[in-house]
Image (cartoon, helix red, strand yellow):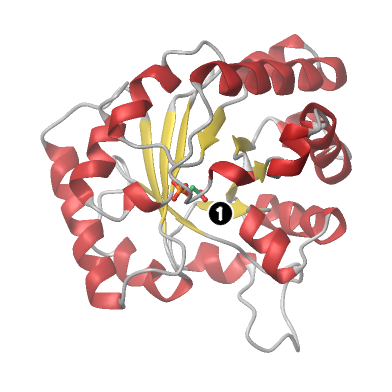
Amino acid sequence: MRKNIVAGNWKMNTTLNEGVGLAKDVNEALKNVTPKCDVVICVPFTHLAPVCGVIDQQKLGLGAENCADHKSGAYTGEVSAPMVASTGATYVILGHSERRQYYGETAETLKEKVRLALDNNLTPIFCIGEVLEQRENGSYLDVVKGQIEEALFDLSAEDFSKLILAYEPVWAIGTGKTATDDQAQEMHAFIRSVIANKYGNEVADNMSILYGGSCKPSNAKALFAKPDVDGGLIGGASLDAESFMGIVTAF
Ligand code: PGA
């Protein structure tokens, strides 16, 4: 069965103390509610192990925001999938548009990252999405289809089924400009059809497809009400426990 998921993406925010405090606040808030979705926080590498020690992972999943495209070795400054897994984290965001844009991630490197994440029992939250120009020139569906095909369609159906997808229109990330619920629904239904054509209806129906891009408590309900929107990947609004919980309880 397809799961509803709300995942926070803290990006490069919070010092260690601040991050542990925020994780504790979210963990505490979750004790008072029974959310109708899985809840995950993806945090900076430095925060993974300490945050793992202060949350109940039955109620709050933990993930990294990236991992290396190699398993180990002479890659100064990189953090591998086995290292992430060894902290207790079980998710990893891969292919975020900021990684593609500022750090030159390509479909080829992402393939390796996905493979290594899966080999280490990490659930990839794989991001796709078009830039404003592609939205405006009408190529956005083809762009997203290409991103999925190039990085993911070598996977077996079994492995592909382990992924979570996050559609994040780049023009909506951190801009305050959210895709309308109808724009999100159009893309999510399209993504599901692309998956169905390759892997069949069952795999497509069971895939969780999250929306990301200026999602906040005030717009989450309308987005999550759409039949093909299975939750959100939340940047800015995940940095405050109350607003993050406002999105979690939108389901
Ligand atoms: P935002 O970021 O919610 O701050 O727009 C979303 C994301 O980049 O994952």
Q: What percent of the width, then of the height, locates residue 146?
A: 86, 37
Is ligand 1 closer than 8 angstroms to the Cβ of mark 1?
A: no
How many residues crowd around disc 1 within 10 Å: few (fewer than 14), some, or many (20 or more)? many
Is 147 on the left-hand or right-hand side of 225?
Answer: right
Residue 233 or 223: which is nearer the viewer? 223
Query: Residue at 23% of width from left, 60% of height from top?
Result: 22
Q: What percent of the width, then of the height, locates residue 49?
A: 37, 70
Residue 154 or 65: which is nearer the viewer? 65
Residue 54 or 243: which is nearer the viewer? 243
Is 209 on the left-hand or right-hand side of 241?
Answer: right
Q: What percent of the width, then of the height, locates residue 71?
A: 73, 71
Is 140 on the left-hand or right-hand side of 245?
Answer: right
Picture quarter with the C terminus: top left
Determine which quarter of the picture holds residue 77: bottom right
Query: Residue at 64% of width from left, 37% of height from top?
Result: 163
Q: Which residue is mark 1?
A: 92
Query: Residue at 81% of width from left, 33% of height from top?
Result: 137
In the picture shown, does residue 27 fall above or below 78? above
Q: What percent of the width, then of the height, locates residue 211?
A: 53, 32
Is 102 on the left-hand or right-hand side of 54?
Answer: right
- State the SS at label 1: strand
In the picture shown, does residue 211 fall above or below 74? above
Determine which quarter of the picture holds residue 104: bottom right
In the picture shown, does residue 31 fall above or below 25? above
Query: Residue at 19% of width from left, 39% of height from top?
Result: 30
Determine which quarter of the picture holds residue 123: top right
